[in-house]
Image: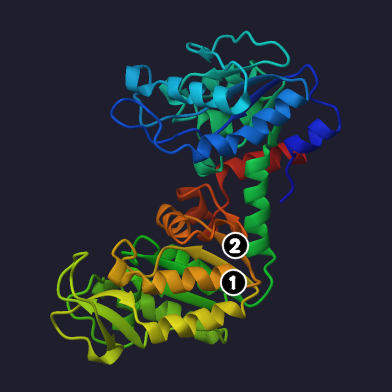
């Protein structure tokens, strides 16, 4: 993917004295008192901001936070807690600027945080008038917010169309490189793990991957539907019987390419969905009518782990069982540790996946951890994200 990179502009000395507008993803969780409870996204945005400051730019940063109503700013919409945390991380003052669309005062070597961009009228619908006003604020526009790359909004798409220069920040560029390595130019065999509660929410992803991967591992409620498609009993487990035909079509598409969708041969069941419910390991063919399947069994987990060990590339989205409950976490832990031990290039994305990675402490053993949820899933679907599209267009001139 040919895009202009902010790091290249900095290296070439093209940023000194320029006004740089950075669209970051600073949408962090806050408690009832408005205090940040998890600051990963803020910390991830710091390298781009530092890069701009070190290059001598006058730096403007903005982000959305929560789900504000356009044109109706409320106290809970403010980025004030983010400005405070950014100042701590950067070691310099980070003034928060409200009502910034018509003009921002910032000098080279300084950084300001522009108040919640989704409060501006026209942001969500990418209104041309707003995009043009924002573009006039800067000499260089930098998109460093992969988490919003699947949305064509004013600060993610419109401004990039009108700014003098539009480029990708280091975080966005790293996502593009990792996704390209995993999907466009993968080292084979390419294995994908797609798990979740419903086939319907990830059917297009499964169909897209079925044309690309050598092994498609399904987990969670999705696996239950595939077990039905294979003629296995699933008791009262979560599944979508209406999509059994679609599951069979995915299996057939993989088989036609000499690839496979491994179906669990053993599972962990319970009579109730509860952390303290007694767990029973059963052969997949022996699931009773009143059983809930809450994890893959140890035999299946070991077989999948062995296959992952030999993979060249691994894409991971979703835990394979109810890993929040200790009794039903073995499958996900086995898969996670197999990915960590594999020499394959691995890329993981999605909130539950990141929670599993953190739980098992394998952050440093995964090749790349994606910062986007919806954006990551849309790339797996085979879609060209709007933010990627406009940056490609601008790079092409």
Which disc, if any, is residue 97? none
First in sequence, mark 2 or 1: give its number. 1
Is 150 drawn above or below residue 107 in the view shown? below
- Whether 217 is drawn above or below 260: the answer is above
Q: Nearer the viewer, residue 70 or 11?
A: 11
Q: Against 309, is 204 above or below?
A: above
Q: Which residue is mark 2?
A: 365
Task: Write the residue at 71% across / 51% down.
Answer: 1
Looking at the image, which is closer to me, 138 or 124?
138
The residue drawn where x is 42% and y is 55% is 355
**Classed neighbour count for the residue bearing mark 2: other residues with Cα under 10 Å, few (<14), some (14–19), many (≥20):** some
SS assignment at label 1 = helix
How far apart marks 2 and 1 lie (CA) works out to 7 Å
Residue contact between numbered discs 2 and 1, judged by CB atoms under 8 Å: yes
Secondary structure of the residue carrying numbered label 2: helix
Is 337 on the left or on the right of 168, as rendered?
left
Q: Tell me where residue 23 sits by quadrant.
A: top right
| Front position in the image: 56 or 232 | 56
Q: Quadrant of the C terminus?
A: top right
The correct choice, above or below, for 5 with respect to 350 in the image is: above
Q: Do we see residue 74 in this rendering?
A: no
Q: Which mark is residue 341?
A: 1
Q: Which residue is nearer to you in this view: 350 or 130?
A: 350
Q: Position of residue 237 (x, y in %)?
A: 22, 74
Residue that appears at 39% across and 74% down: 331
* Spot occupied by residue 33 in the image (x, y as percentages of width and height): 30, 25
């Amino acid at each position: 993917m040919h895009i202009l990179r902010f790091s290249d502009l900095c290296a070439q000395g093209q940023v000194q004295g320029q006004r740089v507008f950075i669209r970051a993803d600073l949408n962090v969780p806050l408690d009832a008192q408005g205090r940040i409870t998890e600051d990963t996204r803020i910390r991830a945005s710091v390298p781009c901001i530092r890069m701009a400051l070190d290059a001598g730019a006058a730096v403007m940063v903005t982000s959305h936070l929560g789900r504000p109503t356009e044109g109706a700013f409320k106290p809970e919409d403010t980025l004030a807690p983010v400005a405070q945390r950014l100042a701590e991380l950067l070691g310099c003052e980070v003034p928060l600027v409200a009502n910034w669309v018509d003009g921002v005062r910032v000098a080279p070597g300084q950084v300001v945080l522009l108040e919640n961009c989704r409060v501006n009228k026209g942001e969500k619908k990418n209104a041309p008038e707003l995009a043009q006003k924002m573009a006039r604020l800067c000499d260089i526009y930098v998109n460093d917010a992969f988490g919003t790359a699947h949305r064509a909004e004013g600060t993610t798409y419109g401004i990039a169309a009108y700014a003098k220069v539009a480029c990708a920040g280091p975080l966005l560029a790293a996502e593009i490189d990792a996704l390209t390595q995993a999907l466009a130019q993968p080292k084979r065999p390419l294995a994908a793990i797609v798990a979740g509660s419903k086939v319907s929410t990830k059917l297009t992803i499964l169909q897209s991957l079925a044309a690309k991967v050598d092994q498609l591992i399904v987990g969670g409620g999705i696996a239950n539907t595939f077990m039905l498609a294979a003629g296995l009993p699933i008791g009262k487990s979560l599944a979508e019987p209406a999509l059994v035909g679609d599951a069979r079509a995915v299996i057939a598409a993989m088989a036609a390419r000499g690839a496979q969708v491994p179906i669990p041969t053993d599972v962990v069941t319970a009579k109730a969905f509860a952390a303290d419910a007694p767990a029973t390991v059963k052969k997949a063919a022996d699931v009773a009518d009143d059983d809930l399947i809450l994890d893959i069994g140890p035999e299946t987990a070991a077989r999948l782990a062995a296959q992952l060990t030999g993979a060249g590339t691994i894409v991971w989205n979703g835990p394979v069982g109810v890993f929040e409950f200790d009794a039903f976490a073995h499958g996900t832990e086995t898969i996670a540790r197999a990915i960590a031990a594999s020499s394959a290039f691995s890329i993981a994305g999605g909130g539950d996946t990141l929670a599993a990675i953190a739980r098992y402490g394998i952050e440093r053993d995964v090749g790349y951890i994606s910062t986007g949820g919806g954006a990551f899933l849309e790339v797996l679907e085979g879609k060209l994200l709007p933010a990627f599209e406009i940056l490609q267009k601008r790079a092409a001139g």
